[in-house]
Amino acid sequence: PRKEYDNATMRLVANESKAWPVVALSIGTRSTEIEINPATAQDQLMSMISLLPDNSAISMQEATLSAVDLIFLTDGSWVKGEYVIVCAIYSPEVGLQGLKQKIVEVI
């Protein structure tokens, strides 16, 4: 939910001492960093679950096409309100190509 992300920050950090860029996520007093290495990204992404607020979700999808459909599965109906969706696009040939955040309203 959007209200949970009012105290959140996400940064993409290039570090010359690391082969891959790092995403740094802070929510309130909790924070974590994950290295965007395609070989280990899924395990690192899943380690972020404990950092996320209640009613949050995290997912990783691989595709060979230029577009994908995102499917969000929940335990129950979504509560009305605004939600924050953050998506990243990564290509093994190019690296991180984009990071976008969008507000979605469930009515």
Image (cartoon, helix red, strand yellow):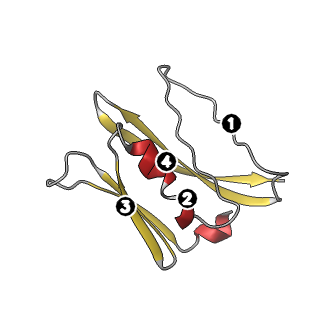
Query: Which residue is at the front of the view, 38 or 24?
Result: 38
Left or right of 17 on screen, residue 9: right
- Observer-nearest of 38 and 83: 38
Q: Which residue: 41% across, 65% down? A: 32
Location of mark 1 (residue)? 71
Q: For the residues labelled 1 and 4, say whether their Cβ atoms are less than 8 Å apart.
A: no
Mark 3 or 2, which is nearer the eye?
2
Of circles 1 and 4, which is in front? Answer: 1
Q: Do the residues labelled 1 and 3 touch (CB within 8 Å)?
A: no
- The disc at residue 33 is 3
Residue hosting label 2: 49
Residue toward you, 94 or 30:
30
- The amino acid on which the numbered mark 1 sits, given as a three-letter code, is Ile
Give the residue at mark 4. 100
Which residue is situated farthest in the left direction here? 17
CA–CA distance between discs 3 and 4?
A: 18 Å
Left or right for 91, reference 68: left
Query: Residue flagged by tag 2: what amino acid is it?
Result: Ile
Asked which secondary structure carries label 1, the reply is: loop
Expressed as whole percent of the image width and height from the top left, the position of residue 35 reads 32, 51
| Badge 4 amino acid | Lys
Badge nearest the viewer, 3 or 4: 3
